[in-house]
């Protein structure tokens, strides 16, 4: 990854851990961070754990990227950092955000969990910020690990020390669970026991959300915010669906990750090919103005009745994940975040986006076509 990005990289046990490490290093406690409201709620709690105030940005309705032109001057003033999302692999306007952050004298931090192969203007996503965090669970499929890339290579030693202070010792039980999980999942898929598999993952703490968003638990969250910043006080939120997010990795994890990472180029090409097919459908969100097709982790098809489409896919054993609805400002409220000044496009996108796995593009297209799914069309209001 150092060769791919042209930047120094540091292994971390999860993307969320790497993001916490970056926010703690680059942002002063009490600072304000501009971020996307259509995002995993875990990331929202990571920002809070770092002692920072989330500021929700307006988004473009067709791809969920930050709409730079609609961020008011009042929001730019007093920011400590900008955090991109690159949702599903669709790049945020990184060059423009980099220029704005330079004028303000604040860091740009890129969350590239979904965007390990995406590019902007010929440069890889993750190559614009002071820091960028990547997941090895997504395109790579390792179900563990990530890395932090930094613009200044001199910082690597300092960040490595900070990482090691935060890591928890590896546990034998966690390593055994990681070792057997792929075989267990393959077995239940072969037996078509998808519901049983998801129940087993919930028991193991690998899948905890019964709805799209985890419960906010406002009373507990107020109490956590009244204490000292840090992962310990926010652990019950940050660990959701990944209890080993800050464990020191064992040999099994590292070896499997290395093996899977060696096949990344082939995976990216498969994602790119499927992305192209899905974007060419009626649900693909309209013209992309000749933009380069990215190897999206998930393609956000825009469907009028998403719940019906999800149900139709589920009947063919195609699980829809990575939904982020409602937006974070609706989910958390103004007590815990600064609200977006233009919330309607984000709410529309969150309600209609159907994250489709590009590796199953042909199956998904057949199911949606047979179900009569209609494309969602943004009416421009808001």
Image (spheres, rainbow, N blue to C red):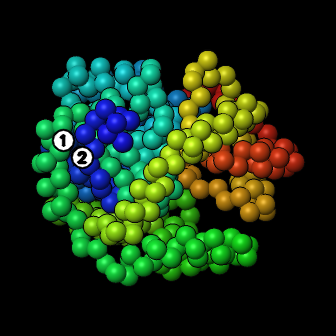
Label 2 vs label 1: CA separation?
Answer: 6 Å
Residue at image mark 2: 22
Relative to 244, residue 159 above or below: above
Q: Residue at (40%, 63%) from the top-left corner?
A: 255
Depth check: 343 or 159 in front?
Answer: 159
Going by the image, does 193 lie left or right of 90?
right
Q: Which residue is nearer to you in this view: 348 or 96?
A: 96
Instruction: Locate residue 172: give its quadrant.
Output: bottom left
- Residue linked to disc 1: 26
**Secondary structure beneath disc 1?**
helix
Left or right of 240? Residue 312 is right
Q: Residue visible at 32% across and 29% down?
A: 128
Asked if the residues shown at circle 2 and circle 1 are in contact, with their CB atoms under 8 angstroms apart, the answer is yes
Q: Secondary structure at mark 2?
A: helix
Residue 64 shows in this picture: no
Q: How many marks?
A: 2
Q: Position of residue 153 (x, y in %)?
A: 18, 37
> How many residues crowd around disc 1 within 10 Å: few (fewer than 14), some, or many (20 or more)?
some
């Amino acid at each position: 990854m150092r060769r791919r990005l042209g930047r120094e990289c540091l292994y971390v046990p999860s993307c969320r851990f790497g993001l916490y490490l970056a926010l703690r290093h680059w942002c002063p406690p009490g600072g304000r961070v501009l971020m996307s409201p259509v995002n995993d709620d875990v990331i929202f709690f990571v920002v809070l754990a770092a002692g920072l105030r989330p500021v929700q940005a307006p988004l473009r309705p067709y791809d969920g990227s930050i709409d730079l032109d609609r961020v008011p001057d009042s929001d730019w003033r007093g920011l400590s950092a900008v955090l991109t999302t690159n949702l599903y692999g669709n790049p945020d306007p990184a060059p423009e955000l980099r220029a704005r952050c330079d004028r303000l004298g604040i860091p740009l931090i890129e969350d590239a969990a979904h965007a390990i192969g995406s590019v902007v203007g010929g440069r890889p996503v993750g190559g614009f910020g002071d820091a960028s965090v990547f997941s090895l669970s997504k395109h790579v499929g390792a179900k563990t690990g990530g890395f932090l890339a930094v613009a200044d290579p001199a910082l690597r030693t300092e960040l490595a020390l900070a990482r090691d202070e935060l890591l928890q010792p590896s546990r034998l039980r966690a390593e055994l669970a990681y070792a057997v999980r792929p075989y267990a999942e393959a077995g239940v898929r072969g037996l078509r026991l998808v519901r049983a598999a998801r129940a087993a993952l919930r028991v193991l703490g690998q899948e905890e959300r019964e709805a799209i968003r985890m419960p906010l638990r406002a009373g507990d969250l107020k109490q956590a915010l009244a204490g000292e910043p840090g992962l310990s006080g926010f652990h019950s939120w940050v660990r959701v669906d990944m209890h080993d997010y800050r464990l020191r990795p064992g040999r099994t994890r590292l070896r499997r990750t290395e093996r899977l990472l060696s096949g990344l180029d082939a995976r990216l090409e498969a994602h790119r090919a499927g992305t192209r097919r899905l974007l060419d459908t009626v649900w693909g969100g309209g013209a992309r103005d000749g933009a380069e097709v990215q190897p999206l982790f998930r393609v956000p098809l825009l469907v009028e009745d998403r719940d019906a489409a999800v149900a139709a896919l589920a009947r063919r054993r195609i699980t829809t994940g990575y939904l982020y609805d409602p937006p974070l400002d609706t989910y958390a409220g103004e007590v815990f975040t600064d609200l977006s000044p233009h919330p309607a496009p984000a709410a529309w996108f969150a309600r209609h986006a159907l994250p489709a796995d590009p590796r199953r593009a042909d199956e998904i297209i057949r199911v949606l076509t047979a179900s009569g799914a209609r494309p969602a069309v943004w009416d421009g209001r808001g």
